[in-house]
Image (cartoon, rainbow, N blue to C red):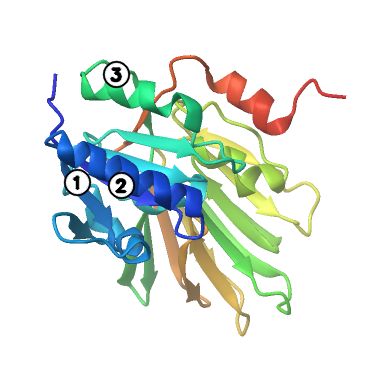
Amino acid sequence: MITIRSIGISAKTTSPAALQLAESLARDLRRRGYGIAFDSDTARALSLDHGFVVASKPELGRAVQLLITFGGDGTLLAVARHAPANVPIIGVNMGTLGFLTEVRFEEFPEVLERVLEGNMVTESRVAFDVFVSRSGDQISRYRVLNDAVINKSALARIIEMRVRVGGHFVSSFRADGLIVATPTGSTAYNLSAGGPIIYPTMGAVVLTPICPHMLSNRPIVLPDELEIEIEIATANQEVFLTLDGQEGLPVSEFDRVMVRKSPEPVSFVSSADKNYFDVLRAKLKWGEA
């Protein structure tokens, strides 16, 4: 059992309630002898005094033994996709529609005390490493928890993408774009585009075309150990690769996007009083008239 002595905190900077809770928690935990680190955006929004460590979002998880986020899924994603596998994350839902931030504000104090006592249940979520190559040279690398999305701008025509899986040619997709989603990300953009919901701990990846030109181009669920390669086959179009809806870059004809399972998963602290299907019913309003 790991004894937690350092805790990283990130809050939605546009939410006064999230910021207030983050600051109150940090001061309480510091009085109890814990080392506290904030991501730089949260620290700036709080105008913190000395005594707290400040790190960038990508580095926050590597400076602590536990991560806590206050806000919605976007707040959690910004730090979680960079976190090491051995750093558990508590995502506290501050009233937004979130599938990842499953710990309610009301139950957070109890969940936190259990975690600090070493009594926690964690759930491992697969992440993807995404590489972009141009003319044979790697130009970018990312880690994603939800998805990698290739799409066109509002004024661009349909784009064409050649897809290979595990080294085998699958098809050329002509569509507004293509989503490569983890099971965790299956309830994000993938769901809106008509893709399936994948149980979050399954070893799977889903390819979902966005508004395909051919109605026979349907979502495909694949084993997550297979490498996916997408080649842009359309010239003179504005095409973008977006990672977890938060980072991205333009891509051009002949650029290749490679997606493979990351060797480091992401570890979430589970809520003790509900399961994944409880979350789905609540968020998707299943069974309601």
Q: Which residue is mark 1?
A: 36
Residue that extends furthest to the right in the rendered view of this protein? 289
On the rendered image, what quadrant is the C terminus found in?
Answer: top right
Whichever of callouts 3 and 2 sits on the residue coming sooner in the sequence is 2
Q: Which mark is residue 126?
A: none
**Residue at figure coordinates x 19%, y 46% from the top left:** 36
Q: Which mark is residue 114?
A: 3
Other residues around mark 2 within 10 Å, as few (<14) / some (14–19) / many (≥20): many
Rounded to the nearest angstrom, the CA distance separating label 3 from label 1 is: 18 Å
Determine the secondary structure under disc 1.
strand
Rounded to the nearest angstrom, the CA distance separating label 3 from label 2 is: 17 Å
Q: x%, y% of residue 38?
A: 26, 54
Q: Are marks 1 and 2 in contact (CB under 8 Å)?
A: yes
Q: Is residue 212 above or below residue 182?
A: below
In-image side of 175 versus 109 (left or right):
right
Q: Which residue is mark 2?
A: 9
